[in-house]
Image: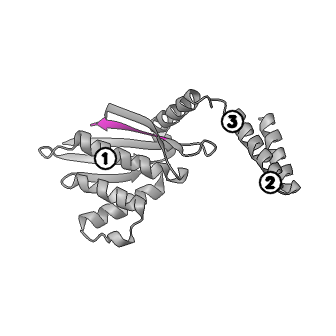
Amino acid sequence: MEVYEIYTDASFLSKVPLKYSGAYIVYLNSKKIYENSYVRHIKNEGKAEIYNLNKSIVDIANRYISRDKKQIFIFKTDCKGNVSICNNILNNVITNTIDYKTLNKEEMMISSSIKRFKNSNLIFKWIPRDENKEADLLAKTTFENKLKNMGLDNKIKYMQDDLTYTLNKWRYWGIGKKYIDRLNKLILELDEV
């Protein structure tokens, strides 16, 4: 019996729009056999975790599913919402009661990916963040390295520049003084960090 445990996590910084990093680490019968991390574009950073989980499902299916072996695939994440979504879809796929008309884009994507595991045991499990440190560190390190390559390794400086840009734009547009004062205060607070 092959037991695959896949630890997944994603990392993003709201001040760096449209980008997130994802990572997953694969253990086979308690031995680490593979890890992958990447940076991708995304329209909504709040969906980084679900997109990363989906990518890991697809990659694992393509890389490891074998029709000739008994296999269990356990996807572990520290995002309870994604585990709930995946388990709900998995139950509906297994019982063939899925109503595609009611699924949103991300749920459709997950459902399509889950179908690849038709003859395998598939489990989605929530784990505390402490148990997901390795995937978390891999995702964060990948994102930090991408920021460095983009010249954005100083996050505070990047945020100050972004706020200053916004402040100047607001001044140009004639937006009210109270908003400009708030933004100035944020910039000063970042100086103190």
In this image, 149 relative to 156: left or right? left
Q: Which is more N-terminal, label 1 or label 3? A: 1
Q: Which residue is mark 2?
A: 173
Q: Is residue 19 magenta?
A: no
Q: Position of residue 29 (x, y in %)?
A: 27, 37
Asked if 114 appears above or below 131 in the picture, the reply is: below
Q: Residue at 35%, 47% (x, y): give it.
A: 75
Magenta stretch? Answer: 21-29
Where 45 sits versus 131, above or below? below
Q: Is residue 186 visible?
A: yes
Q: What quarter of the picture does the N terminus occupy?
A: top left
175, 9: nearer the viewer: 175
**Which x, y percent locates residue 126?**
43, 52
Tell me: 61 left or right of 75.
left
User: Mark 3: which secondary structure?
Assistant: helix
Tag shown at residue 58: 1
Identify the residue at horizontal 74%, vertical 38% (top origin).
Answer: 160
**Mark 3: amino acid:** Tyr
In the image: residue 136, left or right of residue 122: right
